[in-house]
Image (cartoon, rainbow, N blue to C red):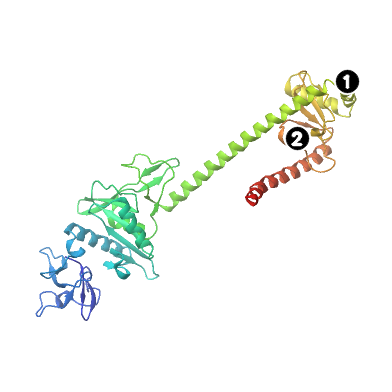
Amino acid sequence: MSFTAVHAERGWLDASLPDLGCGWDWNAIHRVRPPALLVCRECGHGMHAKASPLGLRFFAHAPGAPTCTLAEESMAHHLLKLELAQAARAAGWMAELEVSGPGGRWRADVLASTANGRRVALEAQLASITDDEIRARTQRMNAYGVRAYWFSDRNRIPWLGAVPSVRLTRQDEGLVAVEPMARFTGAYWDPEPSMPLSEFVGRVLTSRFVSHAPRTPQRHVIRPVTLLWACPKYVLSEAKNLKDEEKQQRAAQKEQERAEWRGYARQEAALAEQSARSDPDRAALARHSARLPGIERAIAQATDRFLSRVTVGWSVGDSRYSSGVPLVNDRGTLLAVFDPLPLAGTCPDFLLDVGLPMLFPTEERRECFEEHRVTSERLRRLRQQDVPTELADDE
């Protein structure tokens, strides 16, 4: 059986439409003498207009028909196609049944379309099929600008979610979509309630449901799937959540890197201090630096902060301090730097990495240092961004 046929004069006929899609009455072809000249769109064999005891209109092949995919489809398959077509029409779309693509390269059970050229194939799939086969058929239609969505009322659907698809079940007098529809709840995808087939098709055709590959775990579902159906706002919500997580991870990684660099910088300072303490001349320089204006107040601030005795380090004059004075405890551990000021160029990387207090005799000196520090940070970020480009050029 089939819901479509071709008339020699009227062309394509659709038994699911009141006017057969051509402005013709059903009685013009049903039980007329001589019989209306009808042929199958698929195989070209003759057909007859028929009606079931319950009033279902369809076309049947005349005796002696060759092998034809339409004739081999089950009654359940045909009825599901009819319900899909009715759901598409209820959503305001045009729907044609059993439409073949150019050269017969594909055939849509129901081809739903709009005046602006959007085309969607609603496919009833009740027979067994592999994931690879259904993906290939989907891709074949996609190549011709036709999105393919698959529907089945079987309990076990191995390919469910491998392509945009939905499992249906019959409740009361109608079909309802059961899975996989989901909503994003902040950390998981949770199932959406089941809904009538007409509502589901309407949501899909109007983009209120989109096929989505979730990147977040699915919870309380019958089975996890590769593709599910979701409202666009939930897709955006998941994307934002993942972006925020990635941002937090990058921030944590950068903080870890900064902590490592702080450790390296402080180790360098400790080695420099240890080396300087073997040089008597450096001791004299440290005593001289201890008389600089404002340094006593800075030492008192460091003492209060670190609750230990603070003195001027013997490594004073080291270029890493940028004319500043190292303040250390009795073990020579660097605690702060007094009055660093890059008089020419940028701050040394040491001052950017060490992560210790910078103390100043006046607010003007602090502001001057901050200007140099901000410029140095910006230049260093630019250097870091240039590294991948240089490596790529070298390759």
The amino acid marked with disc number 1 is: Pro
Q: How many marks?
A: 2
Which callout, 1 or 2, points at the residue further toward the start of the chain?
1
Q: Residue at x 73, y 19 (%)?
A: 307
User: Is residue 270 left or right of 83 when viewed as pictured?
Assistant: right
Q: Residue at x 44, y 40 (%)?
A: 187
Residue hosting label 2: 351
Helix, strand or loop at label 1? It is: helix
* Circle nearer the viewer, 1 or 2: 1
Query: In which quarter of the view is residue 342 placed?
Result: top right
Residue hosting label 1: 280
Mark 1 neighbour density, 10 Å: few (under 14) some (14–19) many (20 or more)? few
Q: Is residue 103 above or below residue 372?
A: below
Q: Percent from the top left, x then y, of residue 1?
A: 16, 65
Q: Percent from the top left, x then y, of residue 272?
A: 78, 26
The amino acid marked with disc number 2 is: Leu
Asked whether the residues under the numbered discs 1 and 2 touch, taking CB atoms below 8 Å apart as contact, a structural biologist would say no
Helix, strand or loop at label 2? It is: helix
Which of the pair 382/241 is nearer the observer?
A: 382
Q: Is residue 129 above or below residue 380?
A: below
Q: Percent from the top left, x then y, of residue 208?
A: 39, 56
Which of the pair 106/331 is nearer the observer?
A: 106
User: Is residue 215 left or right of 72 when viewed as pictured?
Assistant: right
Mark 2 neighbour density, 10 Å: few (under 14) some (14–19) many (20 or more)? some
